[in-house]
Image: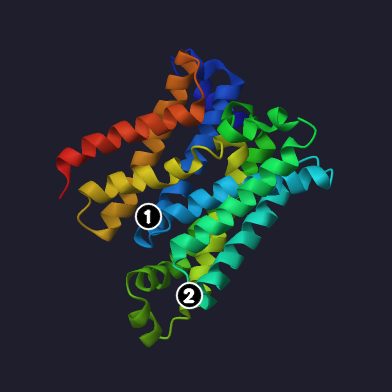
Amino acid sequence: MNLWHCLIDVLPFQWAHYAFMQNALLAILLVTPLFALLGCLVINNQMAFFSDAIGHASLTGIAIGVLLSLADPTWSMLGFALFLAVAISVLRRYSAASTDTLIGLVMAFAMALGVVLLSRGGGFAKYSRFLIGDILTITPREIVRLAVALVVVVVIWCWAFNRFLITFLNRSLARSRGVHVWAVETGFAAIVAAVVAISIPWVGLLVINSLLIIPAATARNVARTTAQYVILAVVFSCATGVLGLVGSFYWGTATGGTIVLAAMALYVVSLFFRR
């Protein structure tokens, strides 16, 4: 961390001389590739609604942490998000209802339960930081947590990308190749849920799905191959993340929302180059 601060401190920009901006920049450079890699497969598997549901339902995870008197509700959010991911996957397998119906039902129940528990006694306002996030308050210990998450996802990505891709493109073809489709879908859902849950305190549950989806959607507009799709998603995600962070510093705005606006602006530009 000291080496990182020394490297950034030499930049000729006002924001680069503040420790909290240096930490936030490092966090952005870790979390945006993480979102981009997952976002590519989320879009291919039409899971945008799922990741949004996990983010909103994390309110109940926060409430569980409060009830258990946990100092850091991130772990209760993580546990509840994993539970929801597996529950939705099981319901998709055994229920006759459509996937979006099941996700909508689970999200409505989980979010309502979280709001009720957190608002009991009029104390909901103190949890509003989870709605918009605050990456400027991230600590070195939490940055290490993000780095570990990125390494784990990259390892899984390299090991199981072909299984993920063939399953999301054609489930019947995947079965014919010996892929355990349900296990692959459930495993990927759990990974997305875990990443969403651990990122909410810094990104905010209101905008986290946008950061997951928009860079990948932008890359899809201009990429010709799968490799280009993934590389461009990572590049676009990192670029808009840094741009949004710096913009929020000078404009005095919420970092998560500013990043989303930058990402959306780039998406609109990409429409003119859509192949």
Mark linked to residue 5: none
- Residue type indicated by callout 1: Cys
> CB of mark 2 within 8 Å of CB of mark 1?
no
Residue 117: x and y in percent read 74, 43
**In this figure, which colouring scheme has been used for the structure?**
rainbow
6 relative to 225 in the view: left or right: right
Above or below, 37 against 180 in this view is above
Closer to us: 133 or 238: 133
The quadrant in which the N terminus is found is top right
Report helix, strand or loop for mark 1.
Answer: helix
Q: Position of residue 71 (x, y in %)?
A: 80, 40
The residue at which mark 1 appears reads as 40
Can see residue 195? no
Q: Label 2 belongs to which residue?
A: 96
Badge 1 crowding class, 10 Å Cα cut-off, few under 14, some 14 to 19, many 20 or more, is many
Viewer-nearest of discs 2 and 1: 2
Is residue 62 visible from the viewing direction of this image? yes
Sequence order check, earlier mark of 2 and 1: 1
| Residue 66 shown left or right of residue 93 in the figure | right
Q: How many marks?
A: 2
